[in-house]
Amino acid sequence: MRKIINIGMITLLSISAITAGEIKGNVKYIGKVRKAKLIRMDADPVCAASHQEAAKNEKMVVDADGNMANVIVYLKGVKYSGKAPSNEVIIDQKGCVYSPHVFGVQAGQPVKILNSDATMHNIHGLPKVNKEFNFGMPKSLKEKSVTFSKAEDVFVIKCDVHPWMKSYTQVFDHPYFAVSGSDGSFSISNVPDGTYEAIAWQEKFGTKRLMSKKVTVKGGNAELNFSFEPPKKK
Ligand SMILES: [Cu+2]
C-alpha cells in the first residue's frame, strides 16, 4: 500500500517539474501618440557631438501602431528556489543615454556598467531596499559592476553629471519577468503551470496605475496582453 502511494507521489512530482509554459504577449498604448521630446545635450559638447540627430526622450516609447516598449511585465509573489543567473545584465552609457532605458535583473545577478563615452559620467542608483551606489566613471573607466541583494520595486538610476540621463530597474527574486521590446512584445519562459497575478509597469504610468491581470499557464503558450490608456478627463 505504502509503495503505491510513493510511486504516485513521485509521478506527480515529476509531472509538475516538467510542465511549464511560455507567457507571450504585447503591450499597447490606446491613445494619441505624441512625438517624443528631443533631449538637449548642450551642457556637454561631447554628448551633443555624439548624436547626428538629437536623442529622444524615452518616457513613452510607442510606435505608429501603438506598440509600447520599455514596459516591465512580471509575475507577482512567485516562489522560486533556483539560483540567480551568473550572466551579467549590461547597462551602457552611450551617447550620454542609458541603454537599456528599462531593465529587470535578479537579486544576486551581476549588473555590468559600461562607459562607451569619451566623457565623465556619475552613475547613481537610488534603491530603497538595496544599497545605494554612486560613483564617477571618467572616460578612462570603462567598466564597473554592481549587484542587488534583494528584490525591489522599480527605482531610478541616474547620472549626476547629465540630468537627462535616467534608467529604471526592478530587482526580482525569480526569473519570471520581461521588458517589452520596440514592437511591444514580450515573453516569459519556463513558467511552471499555475495561475498567477501578472503586473505591467510603465515609466509614465508608474506604480499608481499599476496594471494587474490573471494569467494561467498549463503547458504550451499562454497569452497575456496589456494596454495603457491616457487618464480620462474629468
Ligand atoms: Cu552622464
Image: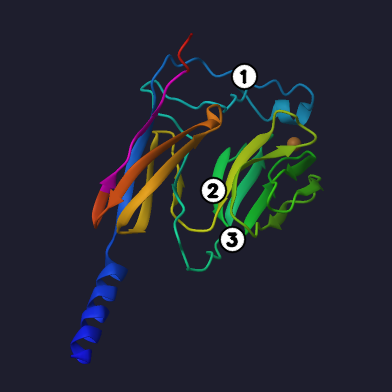
Residue identifier under label 3: 109
Separation (CA) of disc 1 from disc 2: 26 Å
Q: Tell me which label, 3 or 2, sits earlier in the chain.
A: 2
Q: Give the magenta-colored segment's residue range.
A: 222-230
Q: Is residue 92 left or right of residue 214?
A: right
Residue type at numbered disc 1:
Leu
Separation (CA) of disc 3 from disc 2: 10 Å
Residue identifier under label 2: 104
Q: Which mark is residue 38?
A: 1
In the depicted view, which residue is nearer to us: 141 or 14? 14
In the depicted view, which residue is nearer to us: 176 or 57? 176
Q: Looking at the figure, which quarter contains the N terminus?
A: bottom left
Looking at the image, is 88 positioned above or below residue 177?
below
Q: Residues within 10 Å of mark 2 (few under 14, many from 20)?
A: some
Identify the residue at horizontal 61%, vertical 62% (top origin): 108
Residue 83 within the segment the image draws in magenta: no
Give the image location of residue 127, x and y in percent: 69, 46
Q: Residue furthest top?
A: 234
Give the image location of residue 216, x and y in percent: 29, 49
Q: Secondary structure at mark 1?
A: loop
Give the image location of residue 86, x and y in percent: 56, 65
Residue type at numbered disc 2:
Gly
Residue 225 within the segment the image draws in magenta: yes
